Image (spheres, helix red, strand yellow):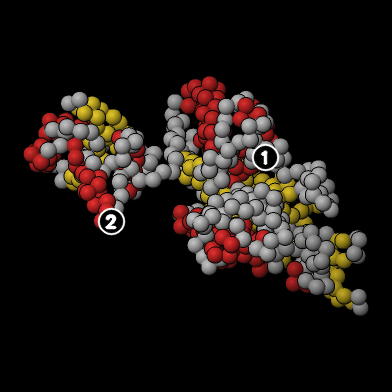
Amino acid sequence: MIYIDPPYNTGKDFIYKDNYKDNLRNYQEVTQQTDNQGNQLSTNAESEGRFHSNWLNMMYPRLILARNLLTEDGLIFISIDENEVDNLKKICSEIFGESNFISNYVWHSNVKGRQMDEHIKGSYENILVYAKRSSSIEIEGIIDRVNIKNIDRDEISCFIRGYPLHNGTSDFHINNRPNLAYSIYYNPQNKKVKVIDEKKKNGSGYFIGNSNDKLKLEGFFRIIPKFNKVYNNQRVWRWGADKFLREYKTELLFLKEKDGFYIYQKKRVDKDGVIVKKRTNYIKIDSGLGRKDLLELGMPKYFDSPKPKILMKNFIEHIVCKNLIFLDFFSGSSSSAHAVLELNKEDRGKRRFIQVQLPEPIDPKEEAYKAGFENIAEIGKERIRRVIKKIKEEEPEKSKDMDLGFKVFKLDSSNIKSWDGDSDNFKQSLLDSVENIKEDRSQEDVLYEILLKHGLDLSLPIEERIIEKTKVFNVGHGTLILCLDDKITSKVAEGIGNWKKECKPAKCTVIFKDSGFTDVEKTNSIQTLRRFGIKEIRSI
């Protein structure tokens, strides 16, 4: 699942330093909208000719990336107000395909309406939902519970009373749907049913005639659709006679009420009284609950308009899978991480989250800055820490089985010095190729770059062990073992081999720092590792 809550195109504070590599670059530089690197500098004023284009240029590559990251049964939710909902839907249909449009949720977020709106106070936002492949998804319905005492049973399942069989829409009546007007005779003693077409016609149209007295004497009760007194019309059934005779035994319920028998569809429930209802595309959740969520964590007035965690839970509960990965492109105060952790606590799920947020500076006048937060990303990290602490305090036993850790990564340049092809710097480039790791980088920095380049999950468990006074990392229980220290010897390789034996991985790769040992020690170390069945040996 992916959620995107982008900066809305209000025309006031939309500034994103995206690098535009298109034919508008020269124009944007001349008009001082970009610097010489192509980074966007200007705000997006409504008077500007490219008011919508600027915002869509920011969104388009992110949506392309989102589609590539989604699994085949994945969903993406995008929050948006009415300024760009039409344009956003067009580019989403282009990127995801019109057939993969699931719904446009109406989120009733502000009961009183927004006072700042000029003519009419807006009280809702839109949430577009698309699938990677609509044929592969399964939307989880809303779970409801009913009184177990009211549950009936048949040979198929448990059930309660559902929709009545008579058509409640006044537009359908005996004169425009005569095929749906017929008499049903039901015998409660032997459960037998008979269908008779007793329609008659006069000058004003169809009507249902007299009942069959012979069947009444045999114990049958006549059931016909209700009469609509307002429109002076005979209503009709929702099913035709053929479908009724085919499915009444398993799908319909005959109930005796004050003025006769009525027919209802069976609504399936489980033995505990759980019923699953299909979702509607209307959500009523007060946006003010987002601030209340932060207040409960001791973080008052730290964020202007955080999304309520209950809204995030609503999105997550669309997915049947309880070990999904939730990616939030503009994570803000990390409401989605909060929701993931709480849901895992409630249903013992194994869901994980990825929060992406630029370190946008906080105004020194704001409460959050005075509390020690210099940028928005720091607020999100602290919120996750406090949620984890709260879960441990409130649910000490349940929290033992939960994964309550998280890691924080920041984008940076490579840890490896790049080759400089300039002939004037040839000597320095040769020296850099020997000591090729930048001086200000730690072994942990290099470790995570290697994980990224090998396509390994950054959340894999990492152990650290000192072998012969040398630091060694073990990733994924022996899947990858790294030694990025200096003065590596064959004794270190021996220790790595024994560690691999302890872990018993299906496949093991060992990586050394090439400048960490002499040629002789390198040869001996390789032979030592091969004795332990390690064939994948590499160096950087």
Mark 2 highlights which residue?
A: 421
Horizontal and vertical percent position of residue 218: 75, 58
Q: Residues within 10 Å of mark 2 (few under 14, many from 20)?
A: few
In the image shown, does 520 or 162 lie closer to the viewer?
Answer: 520
Q: Residue at x 66, y 32 (%)?
A: 366
In the image shown, does 19 or 130 lie closer to the viewer?
Answer: 19
Name of the residue lying farthest toward the bottom: 203
| Res 305 label | 1
Instruction: Tell me if residue 515 can be seen.
Output: yes
Instruction: Tell me if residue 251 can be seen.
Output: no
245 is higher (above) or lower (below) than 360: below
Cα distance, mark 1 to mark 2?
Answer: 50 Å
Horizontal and vertical percent position of residue 99: 57, 66
Query: Is the C terminus in the top left, top right, bottom left or bottom right quadrant?
Result: top left
Q: Residue at x 16, y 33 (%)?
A: 488
Query: On the rendered structure, is 14 left or right of 184?
Result: left
Circle 2: residue type: Gly
| Res 326 label | none
Query: On the rendered structure, is 11 left or right of 199?
Result: left
Q: Residue at x 46, y 57 (%)?
A: 68
38 is higher (above) or lower (below) than 411: below
